[in-house]
Image: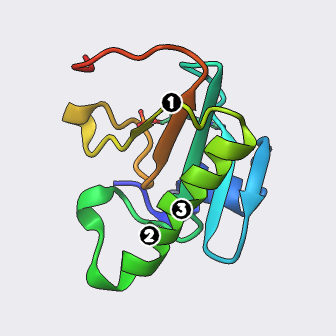
Amino acid sequence: MTDGNSCVFCKIAKKEIQSDILYEDAELAAFRDVNPKAPVHVLVVPKKHLSDHYALEEKDARWVGNAHLLVNRLAKDLEIEDGFRVVINCGEKAGQTVPHFHIHLMGGRDFHWPPG
Ligand code: 5GP
Ligand code: ZN
């Protein structure tokens, strides 16, 4: 289990690791994925450490909602609002590799369903 001190996304939020940050406020940060799986691939994260979607609590509801509104604003700014994929992998079985809650925003290509 990763805590905030050794967590790569905590370090990105604290600017201890360089990334291409597109947006930040007191609670959220959005930055480009270092290994993009689509022409546009952005990650939206809370600045506080939270392991995954299943760790969400009632008190997180406001920033989670704001994170989804931010996804829409980024989709517009990045000109993919006509079609984009929003993904949250929860747990290793679902493909989560970084244990800090994050929303993937992907666009700029066609996507297929069901995902792998
Ligand atoms: P997951 O597989 O956990 O849902 O997604 C983790 C994502 O984080 C992957 O798409 C991976 O490319 C991205 N990632 C991992 N390490 C870094 C990093 O140091 N910087 C950035 N910008 N993205 C990262
Ligand atoms: Zn973290």
What x and y, as percent, mark residue 2? 41, 55
Image quadrant where one finds the N terminus: bottom left
Q: As rendered, which of 49 and 75 lies closer to the eye?
A: 75
Measured Cα–Cα span from mark 2 to mark 3: 6 Å
What x and y, as percent, mark residue 82? 55, 32
- Residue that appears at 68% across and 60% down: 13
Mark 1 residue element: loop
What x and y, as percent, mark residue 52? 33, 56
- Residue that appears at 52% across and 69% down: 66
Q: Are marks 3 and 1 in contact (CB under 8 Å)?
A: no
Residue for badge 2: 65
Rate crowding at label 3 as few (under 14), some (14 to 19) or many (20 or more) other CA atoms within 10 Å.
Answer: few
- The residue type indicated by label 3 comes to Leu
The numbered disc on residue 83 is: 1
Q: Is residue 33 left or right of residue 77?
A: left
Measured Cα–Cα span from mark 2 to mark 1: 20 Å
Image quadrant where one finds the C terminus: top left
- Above or below, 69 against 19 in this view is below
Q: As rendered, which of 2 and 23 lies closer to the eye?
A: 23
